[in-house]
Image (spheres, rainbow, N blue to C red):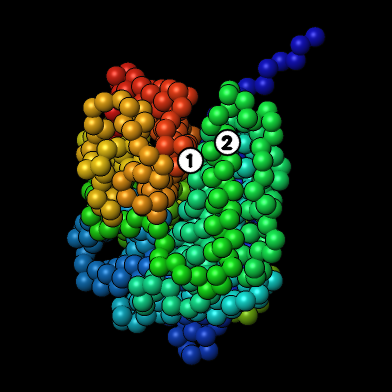
Amino acid sequence: MSRPAVPAVPPWLAHAFRAQREPVPWNAVCRGALAAGPSLLAGMLLGRTALGVLAAIGAMLAGINDRPGGRRASVRRLGVPASAGAAGLLVGTYAGQGLTAVPLTLVLTALGLAAGGISAVGPVASAAGTQLLVAAAVGAGTPAADPGWQRALAFLAGAGWLLVLRLVLPTPGSLAGDFRFDGERAAVAGVYDAIAALVEAAGGPHATARRAALTAALDHAQDTLAGPRLRGHAASAAERRLHARFAAALPLAEAATALCWAGEPVPARAARGPRRLAAAVRADTGPGPLPAPHLPPARLRAPEAPSVLPALRALDDALLGAAEAFDRGDGTHRGLPVRRRGPRRALRAALGAGGREYGLRVALCFGASAAIAQALHHARWYGPHPHWYWLPATAVFLVKPDLGPLASRVLCRAAGTVLGALVFAGLAALLPHPAGLIALVAVCGALIPVATRHFAALTAVVTVLVLALIMAGGEPQASAGRIGETLLACALVLVVGHLPMPRERGGGVRDRLAVAGGAAHAYLLHVLGPPGHEPAAGSGDHAEHRVPPGEPGDRAERWTKGGGPGDRAERWALRREAYRTLAEARTAIAHAAAELPALARHTEGTDAVAEALERLVDTTTACAVHLDDTGRLTPRHLRRLREALAELERLERRGVRVPLPVAA
């Protein structure tokens, strides 16, 4: 007797129940406990409770952005959004004081349009746009007894206090060496661990997933090491050592990717070297004896697997090079081999199809929610509450595509708000005032780093924290009103999210795929293109180039060992850019595919483009390693290269509406 088939869970619903699985960040938990609660307490002790509430809000929003990484990188990750939030609070306060409802709504709508476009630039810009709008809603929607500049400074003080804690407090269990760089050491060690995992998975079913994990580890380490600094280069010996060790991981990552592409298992001892290097980075010591270069087993010397031997030799050479870099102590590396993304790239992202589409939706949601909130406020729907910021602030979080698919965001936000409001209603009746509220704010601040794993959990914690701040500021308990406003914001964002736009939908996904295609094309030209056709170093924009006529293999076969335009540092920088942009496109495609069918259909076929681009970049990497070793490409390399290019051309002919900059 056959069992009845279980209906498949829709992607948008499955995403709502998906949570990140990570270790508890105890250091971030400690910082959260010491940030929002003490900020509120300081305001109360100084007799400026309203400013203390704003400082706690600044600390809370900074805590949401307090993710693992290096201390220097946290300056940008926390400081830029906090500065944008202070500016939004300043503008919102003065606009709310000096403008009537209609002009104020127009100002907030224009602010939403600008913040939405900026959010398309990257994660830090997205966080800055969010804090700008949330703080503007708070400034305009709450009565201001204090001047706007004092409110902005209080907001900055709360966020700045958390940033000071991030820079000063050591990470528990990471006191080896200079603790200021414990986040950087963990990130670089993660790269070596990911290389070892990829080598172990070569020829197995998990090789593709391990290659994606290596890309994520490299992206994280690169961002961690590339934080802002007063000087243009690494000043301390510890930092130079970390930069040199990260640079030494790049040829290892290239060789491991080539082994993954070859599709043949390799000896288990091949992964021992990267594992020992990872342990040395974590302990800030030398690596000790590393496995000697090994001879491949006899079965890998057969003609049917000729592409494995150059990759194995490249892995051995890279391991020896890494050992030399580790033995040099503070290193002599002059900088990170990365291609900088300049203002022109950021402007193109903000004004591109994705930035315009997102900006319009944010402007509509933020402006409409502000207008509705003001109308309800003047109609006394809020009862005795003098503020109306909750509805537009909720709409800002709901309209953000980097928090997940629209339906999933709405469901999680509604469930989290209801749960948080009910929990707070019970706690408010039991806790003493104001000491109990201050303690509740501190506990919620500590829970935020853990709650960021799931949007519903984060919403519940933030709801409890904000309601506690509202009551600490002298207002009555407001759980019921917050539930009603949240559900109204959910309905509004669902409507606006499905409205047709002047241009085609899915602009953000297509923009990211176009950038990924341009990066893949630049990398391909650097490895296989003839001299004179390579892109200028540091340009970062290659979407207008196309591969010159002729067979890539014919050009490659004329090269000699170690040849090719530019040096290997430039090649590794181009490879990093290609894989990074592909990972960003993959994330955007996954979010778009989990939307409701009415929205998901606009990005159909983009996953096939991303897969074809990944095969092209993987093959280009294998070609680079093989050319370094032999100076010529095998028929297998040429065939796989032609197949990847032909697949991209076929997708373009089939009508997949993505600007593909790579042509066969």
Residue 397's place in the image compared with 159, above or below, is above
**Dot 2 surroundings within 10 Å: few (below 14), some, or many (20 or more)?**
some
Q: Is residue 428 left or right of residue 136?
A: right
Residue 342's place in the image compared with 428, above or below, is above
> Residue shown at 45%/23% (left/top)?
635
Residue 140's place in the image compared with 337, above or below, is below
Q: Which of the 4 quarters of the picture holds residue 314?
A: top right
Q: Is residue 230 left or right of residue 162?
A: left
Query: Identity of the amino acid at label 2?
Result: Leu
For mark 2, give the secondary structure.
Answer: helix
Q: In the rendering, at what x and y percent does residue 405 appear?
A: 46, 40
Answer whether residue 153 is visible to the viewer in this image.
yes
Q: CA distance from mark 1 to mark 2?
A: 9 Å
Disc on res. 309:
2
Nearest the camera: 370 or 439? 439
Q: In the rendering, at what x and y percent does residue 339 appear?
A: 34, 55
> Residue shown at 40%/76% (left/top)?
156
Nearest the camera: 284 or 469? 284
Q: Which of the 4 quarters of the picture holds residue 235?
A: bottom left
Answer whether residue 591 is visible to the viewer in this image.
no
Nearest the camera: 55 or 371? 55
Residue, far top: 1
